[in-house]
Image (cartoon, helix red, strand yellow):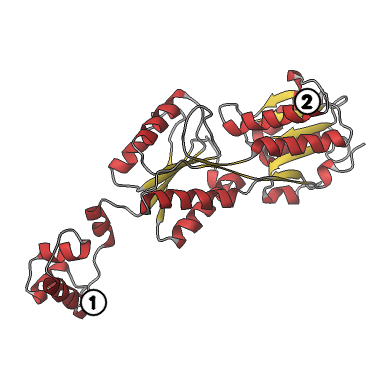
Amino acid sequence: MNKLASRKDVARLAGVSEATVSRVFNNISPLREQTKQKVLQAAKELNYHPNVIAQNFAKGKSNNIGVIVPYLPKVNLLSTHYFSELVSGIGARLGELGYGLLLIFHQTPDERKDYVQLFHSQRVDGCIILGARHNQNELKALEKLHQLKLPYCLINQTFSKQPFHFIDADHLDGSYQATMSLLEKGFQQILFLNGPLEFSNSLDRLQGYKKALSQKGILFNEKLIFEGNYSRKSGYKAADQISSLLAKSKAIISANDRMAIGLMQRLNELGFYAGKDYAIIGYDNSEIAKMTTPSLSSVNVPLYEMGQLAAEKVLQSITHDINEQIMIKLPVSLIERESSLHVH
């Protein structure tokens, strides 16, 4: 088997130093055209291919975009519809544009965040942040990132008083559509299982719920609001409290499908059947929503497209040195299925 040609071999054949070969392939400093052509010709004859990692290092580039995902104990993040769709969208677009994806997991929720360090270590040329929370730790890390004008984008999290770059979906409208759909079917009291309020999408969904009630002249009732953590288990746990209110409130909105499915499972064990004894609408329109019995109504969120768009915008800021504000909200739509259609 032929030995792979080295930079030293190219330098010997071209009659130049190894440093000159390196400068040719990294395009670092001005060189005489004749010297450059001699090196390229020698490389061609020897079938020499420069080390891409070394090249990128010399240029201060990694050709990787870091995708930062949160710490969630005992959850295989990439098996969840939400994260798998986002990461697939990001990865597909990066691949098309010749970039790699580097997944970076936060170890604990209290870990001191330092996104800038990822750039200093040359691990990434830009970053996309998933699952950011509204807390001081996160705010400080993002302020530092933004002030240095490094390429980044948040997905599905906004900070109302900060100019941070984000791609989001219109969660206020999604929750409004779900609530309005149930109100128009004659449900007067609607239970709402939300996610933690340190996520802006939870706040937006609460606002959408309140907006729909207000338009129908119904007073907001704090006692109808419950909080989970977006896991199936938290939906299952919330069911015991929720079941005691089902005599009066025969409709439920859940802030994601996983909680809705946990909720339906436990309520089923307690003798309450979705689509018959109560109506329920989930959120995210995951694949599993079509497979439940009854099939689950849900708000469709274009997660894959959000991932693609975030990748595109971050790469634009790298390749074209663009630093304009990224503030995009994509539309959502309610998909009605059996779980909310025929309850009396």
Q: x, y percentage for residue 330? A: 61, 45
Q: Left or right: 223 with respect to 85? A: right
Give the mark nearest the N terminus, 2 or 1: 1
Residue at image mark 2: 214
The residue carrying pointer 2 sits among few (fewer than 14), some (14 to 19) or many (20 or more) residues within 10 Å by Cα, namely few
Q: Which disc number belongs to residue 47?
A: 1
Tag count in the figure? Answer: 2
Q: Looking at this rendering, what residue extends furthest in the right direction? A: 344
Visible residue check, residue 264: no
Say above or below: 30 vs 75: below
The residue carrying pointer 1 sits among few (fewer than 14), some (14 to 19) or many (20 or more) residues within 10 Å by Cα, namely few
Q: x, y percentage for residue 264? A: 76, 37
Q: CA distance from mark 2 to mark 1?
A: 72 Å
The residue nearer to you, when weighing 274 against 48, is 48
Q: Residue at x 82, y 43 (%)?
A: 339
Circle 1: residue type: Asn
Q: Residue at x 57, y 31 (%)?
A: 199
Q: Residue at x 19, y 74 (%)?
A: 40
Circle 2: residue type: Ser
Badge 2 element: helix
The residue nearer to you, when weighing 11 against 333, is 333
Say above or below: 92 vs 242: below
Q: Quadrant of residue 218?
A: top right
Q: Quadrant of residue 19?
A: bottom left
Q: x, y percentage for residue 198? A: 56, 27
Badge 1 element: loop
The residue nearer to you, when weighing 265 against 279, is 279
